[in-house]
Each structure stands twice: as structure tokens, then as C-alpha cells.
Image (cartoon, rainbow, N blue to C red):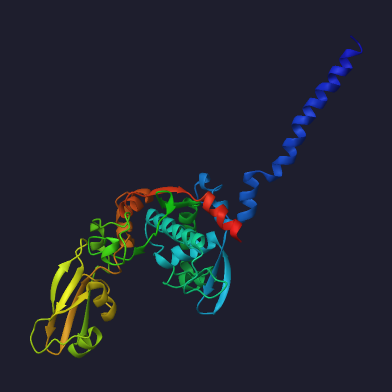
């Protein structure tokens, strides 16, 4: 018994060491350490459950062509999304609307990076910083533009990006084309009424909140001569300005007949540089006064509509599922891994 007792003590000590030593070795590389060290930023105001998923956005880089500098900058995905959300939606908007915008922005860039589509992008870049893709501004540009409001606006936008970190919008398991625009005329458009192709999740839905948007209604005045030249039509001396013969499901102009020449509402909007394809017009002397409702192409999520929904208490999940029919909010982990592997 006197010999066995020291042996038992030694065995117990060895067992304890085998448990303690691995735990000590693993501790410095735990998820908590990686999040706080890798991001290196104050997470105050961001829900704790979002801290771990934020790492996914920090591991992917986006090659952005900076148009004003004619150079390419490699930007971490999280920083890119902050720059996009801040540029595409007012920071004054409700937090849930900003989260919806962050989700659409991440979905867009993930789909873009996976497709390797570089049409219209300089060699070595993946996107531009313009409306051709998504408007992006760097932190320095945001600081200059926001001035004394920089701190609270940056914190608010960053929180929205991190609250949706690692998540995208999918339809049948694939990232969607998450189009958005400023203000609707009260309805969004079916995709095929503005662009070629019927996209099942881009359906016309009501958006009554847009009526509170400062961009809901506008007028444009141009001479008859300019109107005719831009559209390639001859109005004559009468008061009639073409005949609207068809509307879209979203209550916008689909087709106009100018004495046998048919033009689409989209063509007219683009050629006359109108805010929307929901327009009416009247001739006043040598001028034509055009009144439009809404601002933008009308397909996908209305930004002012999203803010109106948020102000009524809807969360970002409800907002995106209203404007994108039948979609799911899913983890982009596997897609992020694919993008990283392609580097």
C-alpha cells in the first residue's frame, strides 16, 4: 500500500496535465481571440452574436477600380460594403433599412465575384466604384463627406453591415440579382417590363411608403424641338404628344405610339433622361412639361420603401422578402470559401 499510493498520485498528476496543457495551447487561437484581434475595431453597438460571422467578411478582398484615380485598390469585403451602403443609402435611414441595403450589397458582390464577370472593368479589377456596379467610397472619402457627423454615421452603417455579415439572398440556392433603386411610383416593376428576361423573384409588388419620399414626384421642361430630336419623332403643330397604348403591371409606361412609331417607356425615359418611366406630359407653347412619379428603374427593392417599412416596425428580413419574392436569407460561407480559393 505504501508503494501504490505514490504511483496513484503520479498517475493522477499526469492525467491532469494531459487535460490542462492542450487547453492552454488552444486558448490563444480561440474564436474570441481571432475576432477581437483580426478586426481590430470597437464592436460597441453590434450584437454579440454577429461578432463571429463578421470574420467571413474580413477574409475576402475586392479589387475596386477607383475611377477618379484610375487605379485599383484591394479592399476588405467588410470595408467595401460599408463604403457601398454609405454611398447608396442615407445613413439617416432606419437601421433595418440599412441592414436590408447591406444584404443586397453583399449579395451583389458575392454573385459578381463568383461569376468572374469582368465586362466593363479594367484588367485586374473586379468592380468599379460607380453606378455601373455599386457606388463605393473609401473611409477617407466618407470622413470628408460626412464631416462632423462621421463618427455616428460610420458606426451606424458598420453595425448594419455586421448585423448581416456572412449572409446573402438566394433563390433556389443561388445568389440573386439584388437590384434596387431610390423611389417607386407606388409599385415595383416585373423584371421583364424593364429588362429582358423573366426573373421569378423580381415581381411587381405594392410599395405605398414611397409617397413620403422627397423624390416621389418631379417635373422636367424641354422644348418641343429637343423632345423631337431626342426621340426621333415629329409631333406636328397639334397638342397631342403621342399616345400611351400600354402600361406595365407596375403602372409605368410600357409603349407609346408616335404616329405609327412605337417607343418603349424605358427608351423614352433614357433618351429624355427622366427620373422614371411613369410619366405624363403636356404641351405648353413651344415647351413640353413632363411630370414623373418615382425615381429609378423600379425593379427590386425601393430604398425609400424599405425605410418606410422599417419606420413601421418591419425588420430587414421582412423588407427584403417583400421586395424579392420567394427568396431566402442564407449563409454565404461556402461561396466565400470558393471565392477565397479562386485567389
**Viewer-closest of 71 and 176:** 176
Q: Residue furthest left?
A: 238
Residue 279 is at least partly visible in this image: no
The percent position of residue 292, horizontal first and vertical second, equals 21, 72
Residue 194: % across, % down: 28, 67
- The residue at 56%/57% (across/down) is 339
The quarter in which the C terminus is drawn is: bottom right
Q: Is residue 251 above or below residue 285?
A: above
Residue at left offset 21%, top offset 67%: 252
Q: Is residue 229 left or right of residue 284?
A: right
In which quadrant of the rendered view does residue 288 lie? bottom left
Taking 294 as reference, is 156 left or right? right
How many marks are shown on the rendered structure? 0
Quadrant for the N terminus, please: top right
- Relative image position of residue 318 (x, y in whole percent): 34, 48
**Going by the image, does 319 lie left or right of 209?**
right
Hey, which residue is sitting farthest right in the picture?
Answer: 3
Q: Nearer the viewer, residue 309 or 57?
A: 57
Residue 200 falls in image quadrant: bottom left
Q: Is residue 193 left or right of residue 336?
A: left
Residue 327 picture location, percent across and down: 37, 50
Task: Look at the picture and state if 100 lies above or below 23.
Answer: below
- 136, above or below 260, in the image: above
Whether residue 328 is visible: yes
Amino acid at each position: 500500500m505504501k508503494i501504490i499510493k505514490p504511483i496513484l498520485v503520479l498517475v493522477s498528476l499526469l492525467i491532469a496535465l494531459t487535460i490542462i496543457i492542450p487547453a492552454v495551447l488552444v486558448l490563444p487561437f480561440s474564436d474570441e481571440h481571432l475576432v477581437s484581434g483580426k478586426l481590430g475595431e470597437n464592436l460597441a453597438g453590434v450584437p454579440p452574436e454577429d461578432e463571429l460571422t463578421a470574420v467571413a467578411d474580413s477574409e475576402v478582398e475586392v479589387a475596386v477600380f477607383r475611377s477618379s484615380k484610375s487605379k485599383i485598390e484591394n479592399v476588405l469585403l467588410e470595408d467595401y460594403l460599408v463604403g457601398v451602403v454609405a454611398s447608396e443609402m442615407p445613413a439617416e435611414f432606419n437601421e433595418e433599412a440599412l441592414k436590408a441595403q447591406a444584404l443586397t450589397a453583399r449579395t451583389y458582390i458575392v454573385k459578381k465575384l463568383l461569376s468572374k464577370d469582368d465586362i466593363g472593368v479594367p484588367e485586374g479589377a473586379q468592380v468599379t466604384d460607380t453606378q455601373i456596379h455599386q457606388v463605393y467610397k473609401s473611409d477617407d472619402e466618407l470622413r470628408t463627406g460626412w464631416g462632423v457627423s462621421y463618427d455616428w454615421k460610420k458606426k451606424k452603417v458598420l453595425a448594419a453591415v455586421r448585423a448581416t455579415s456572412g449572409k446573402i439572398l438566394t433563390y433556389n440556392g443561388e445568389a440573386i440579382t439584388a437590384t434596387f433603386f431610390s423611389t417607386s411610383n407606388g409599385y415595383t416593376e416585373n423584371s421583364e417590363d424593364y429588362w429582358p428576361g423573366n426573373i421569378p423573384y423580381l415581381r411587381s409588388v405594392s410599395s405605398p411608403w414611397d409617397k413620403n419620399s422627397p423624390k416621389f414626384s418631379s417635373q422636367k421642361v424641354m422644348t418641343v424641338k429637343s423632345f423631337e430630336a431626342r426621340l426621333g419623332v415629329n409631333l406636328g403643330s397639334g397638342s397631342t404628344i403621342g399616345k400611351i397604348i400600354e402600361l406595365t403591371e407596375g403602372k409605368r409606361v410600357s409603349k407609346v405610339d408616335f404616329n405609327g412609331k412605337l417607343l418603349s417607356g424605358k427608351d423614352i425615359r433614357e433618351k429624355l433622361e427622366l427620373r422614371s418611366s411613369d410619366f405624363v406630359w403636356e404641351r405648353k407653347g413651344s415647351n413640353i412639361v413632363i411630370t414623373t412619379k418615382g425615381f429609378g428603374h423600379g425593379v427590386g427593392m425601393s430604398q425609400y420603401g424599405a425605410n418606410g417599412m422599417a419606420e413601421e416596425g418591419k425588420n430587414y428580413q421582412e423588407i427584403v422578402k417583400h421586395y424579392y419574392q420567394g427568396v431566402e436569407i442564407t449563409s454565404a460561407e461556402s461561396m466565400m470559401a470558393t471565392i477565397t480559393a479562386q485567389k
